[in-house]
């Protein structure tokens, strides 16, 4: 893909075009895999998925759309560096904001209530993905193998699920769990 095309893809993704966001995510996933293999101290697909999510969430800060690859490489290095600093297992609520974690605001019962709330709000396919990815701690590749879906497709689905989870956490904070 030429830089001009990639720049057009970035602009479309920034406007919120879902197909462009997914295509950009997949392009970055494919193009940066060799570098991720050299940098990652944990599952390469997880590192790439995290990088893709961060890049898509940060498109507004990108000064020149055509510089997306160098921006993505910088993000990838940061993600890998974080992995080097803190090797740890994923728990069911690791990615929840601090106020929702045990010892950070929620008791074990409240954490279970939050997970139940999230599962009630998700569609069947999303619920299965959430359980595999968060509750069972599978990597992106592990989810792909479990579901027989391509790794890149799973990474895109996890990106969309994370966006939905953020919205659900906001709803939960506002008292949406009561009804």
Image (tube, helix red, strand yellow):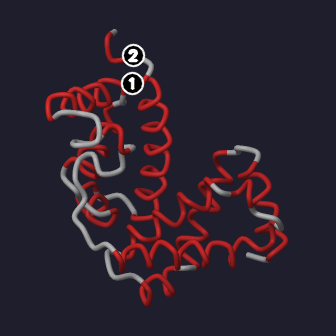
**Residue 75, quarter of picture:** bottom right
Q: Residue furthest top?
A: 179
Q: Judge the density around disc 1: few (<14), some (14-19), many (≥20) Cα neighbours within 10 Å.
A: some
Q: Which mark is residue 24?
A: none
**From what the image shows, is residue 144 above or below residue 168?**
below
Q: Residue furthest bottom?
A: 38
Which quadrant is the N terminus positioned in? Answer: bottom right
**From what the image shows, is residue 133 above or below residue 120?**
below
Q: What is the x, y in percent for residue 62?
A: 76, 63
Which quadrant is the C terminus positioned in? Answer: top left
Q: What is the x, y in percent for residue 74?
A: 61, 77
- Secondary structure under badge 2? loop
Residue contact between numbered discs 1 and 2, judged by CB atoms under 8 Å: yes
Direction from residue 147 to residue 174 in the image, left or right? right
**Residue 124, quarter of picture:** top left
Q: Nearer the viewer, residue 12 or 58?
A: 58
Mark 1–mark 2 Cα distance, whole angstroms, equals 5 Å
Residue shown at 23%/47% (left/top)? 92
Q: Residue furthest left?
A: 109
Q: What is the x, y in percent for residue 107?
A: 18, 33
Q: Which residue is mark 2?
A: 175
- Secondary structure under badge 1? helix
**Residue 140, quarter of picture:** bottom left
Q: Which residue is mark 1?
A: 172
Direction from residue 39 to residue 139 in the image, left or right? left
Q: What is the x, y in percent for residue 35?
A: 51, 86
**From what the image shows, is residue 26 above or below residue 81?**
above
Residue shown at 65%/57% (left/top)? 58
Residue shown at 28%/30% (left/top)? 119
Residue shown at 56%/60% (left/top)? 54
Q: Nearer the viewer, residue 75 or 150?
A: 75
């Amino acid at each position: 893909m030429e830089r001009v095309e990639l720049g057009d893809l970035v602009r479309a993704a920034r406007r919120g075009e879902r197909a462009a966001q997914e295509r950009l995510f997949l392009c970055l996933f494919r193009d940066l895999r060799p570098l991720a293999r050299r940098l990652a101290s944990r599952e390469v697909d997880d590192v790439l998925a995290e990088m893709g999510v961060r890049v898509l969430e940060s498109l507004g800060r990108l000064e020149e759309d055509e510089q997306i690859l160098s921006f993505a490489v910088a993000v990838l290095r940061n993600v890998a560096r974080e992995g080097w600093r803190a090797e740890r297992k994923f728990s069911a609520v690791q990615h929840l904001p601090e106020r929702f974690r045990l010892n950070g605001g929620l008791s074990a019962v409240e954490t279970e209530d939050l997970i139940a709330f999230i599962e009630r709000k998700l569609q069947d396919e999303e619920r299965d993905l959430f359980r595999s990815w968060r509750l069972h701690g599978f990597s992106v590749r592990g989810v792909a193998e479990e579901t027989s879906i391509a790794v890149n497709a799973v990474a895109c689905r996890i990106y969309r699920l994370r966006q939905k989870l953020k919205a659900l956490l906001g709803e939960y904070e506002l008292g949406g769990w009561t009804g």
